[in-house]
Image (cartoon, grey):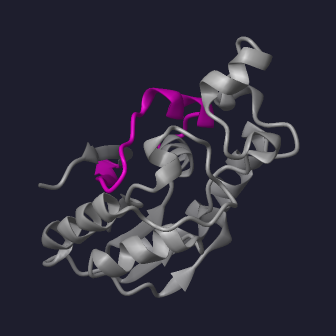
Amino acid sequence: MGEIVVVRHGQTEWSANGRHTSTTDLDLLPEGEERARNLAKALANRPFVAVVSSPRKRALRTAELAGLTVTEIDLDLVEWDYGDYEGRTTQQIRAERPGWDLWTDGCPGGETPEQVTVRMDRFLAKARPMLTLGDVAVVSHGHASRSLASRWLDQPVSFGARLSLDTATLSVLGHEHGHESLRAWNAPVA
């Protein structure tokens, strides 16, 4: 059975500043491009039966710089829709709405945790048959990737709050004795 190799996109201006970025389509910063290039070394000898990416240019550019040829674009891999909170930091949001938590509250005008759960479960239902053929690379975003891992582990998306994920890192969703497992998480590439 193959593994899902999760690639988080490289750093953008907004990710560097902690601003929530879903539909705003930003370019990578030079540092983000450099770190994305570094991913190529870790991925060079790993064959993939599919490389599935979010349609956002930050994800597609990361895939390109990492030496991955995207075989499919999938809207289920886009970042959480932050709605009214797009471009704002958690600190700014909590100044107006104390105690707000993305993982349990979702976003007004955007997605709820339940909607993200449906999206991630739908993606995993499409990915599982591919895994019978080999490894699948997924190029996505911070909260979306953390949600994907949570659902892989049969946990609620809120479990993703406990899975820190830096830009331009690799994570591996695999199996251990017949159970879905985290084989690697948030692995930086030198």
Q: Could you tell me which quadrant the N terminus lies in?
A: bottom left
Range drawn in magenta: 152-178
The percent position of residue 125, horizontal first and vertical second, equals 60, 64
Q: Nearer the viewer, residue 25 or 183?
A: 25
Kindly indicate the quadrant of the structure image that contains residue 158: top right
Q: Residue at x 37, y 87 (%)?
A: 69
Residue 19 image point, x, y percent: 58, 41
Q: Position of residue 90 (x, y in %)?
A: 62, 28
Above/below status of 47 relative to 109: below
Q: Is residue 155 above or below residue 167?
A: above
Instruction: Report if residue 174 lies within the magenta region.
Output: yes
126 sits left or right of 27 in the view: right
Out of 2 and 64, give the one closest to the viewer: 64
Q: Where is residue 74, by image quadrant? A: bottom right
Q: Which residue is located at x 49 percent, y 43 percent? A: 146
Please state the horizontal and vertical placement of residue 164, each as a whole percent of the image.
Answer: 39, 34
- Please give left or right for residue 170 compared with residue 94 in the image: left
Examine the structure image and report whether residue 162 is included in the region drawn in magenta. Answer: yes
**Left-right relation of 66 to 97:** left
